[in-house]
Image (cartoon, rainbow, N blue to C red):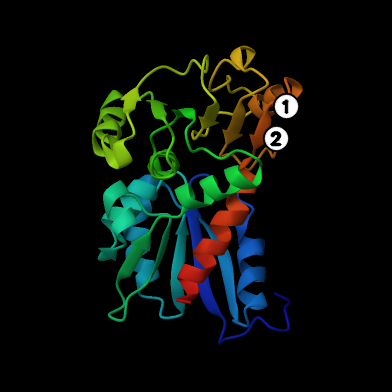
Amino acid sequence: MSSSTLNGATRVHLIVGDPIAQVKSPAGVTDAFNARGHNAVCVPAHVAPDNLIAWLAGTTLSQNVDGIIVTVPHKFAAYGLCATASDRARFLQTANVMRRNADGRWHGDMFDGLGYVEAMRERGCNPAGKRALLVGAGGAGSAIAHSLVMAGVSELVIYDESATRLATLVERLNGLQGVPVRAGTADPTGFDIALNATPIGMKDTDPMPMDASKFTPHMHVGCVITAPAITPMIAAARALGCTTQTGADMFGKVRDLMVTFLLGE
């Protein structure tokens, strides 16, 4: 959007997270709005978890704010602040996008998982019939887990540092589509797919989210992080000949789904 098209009639959509400087979506989402003929803009909002409820209450009063994209660490909390939600979001109890209902309250949905699996297929990996390891049972992780099960993996093993969060997700997923889902470790040995759905890898001082020395060339290795574009784990996987997908690969697919949702198309 150029300064000549930004005016008082511009509709505002926000992306909220903590931190927020790493996100690449404001420009891409704004361009997508404009490409579809809408005078709208996406603006970042840095909001700490303790302030999310108060921030949303204030944001709701702004009559030109039509939608909110939700990123780390607010996806679970955002779902709880929605008046209504899609079946998918209700199952996951998370939301990564919210739009206004006719009464001004918020309707939530969750597209991280759908976008991730679409990106996986585009990068040459069809998850159907494959054994998958997922590290992270947070907002993005739970959505990806759900979509992997619905895509027909043969088995899904999930690891998360929070035993309570992990147990809740495994219990909710188990039995869907007849796919066995269980809690495990972050050891990728023997899996066809190994995915990191945590923020581990955003900082230079972060350890690897899983032991990359145990990757083998037949594996597909993925990560949800967008900055850095290539995390050390993805770099290690590529050096071993694995197929890979990055956070940017995922977000391109998620962005299209979110824009369609936000515009009500």
Q: Position of residue 238 (x, y in %)?
A: 73, 27
Residue displayed at 41% across by 17% down: 185
Q: Residue at position x 33%, y 54% from top?
A: 89
Q: Which residue is mark 2?
A: 230
| Residue 225, placed above or below residue 193 | below
Vertical order, 2 against 235 (above or below): below
Question: In the rendered structure, which amino acid carries the disc numbered 1?
Answer: Arg
Residue indicated by mark 1: 238
Position above or below: 64 against 27: below
Q: Is residue 21 above or below residue 163?
A: below
Element class at badge 1: helix
Say what amino acid the circle numbered 2 marks. Answer: Ile
Q: In the rendered structure, are the residues bearing label 2 and label 1 in contact, judged by CB atoms less than 8 Å apart? A: yes
Q: Quadrant of the N terminus?
A: bottom right
Q: Which one is in front in this view, the residue at disc 2 or the one at disc 1? A: 1
Q: Nearer the viewer, residue 57 or 25?
A: 25
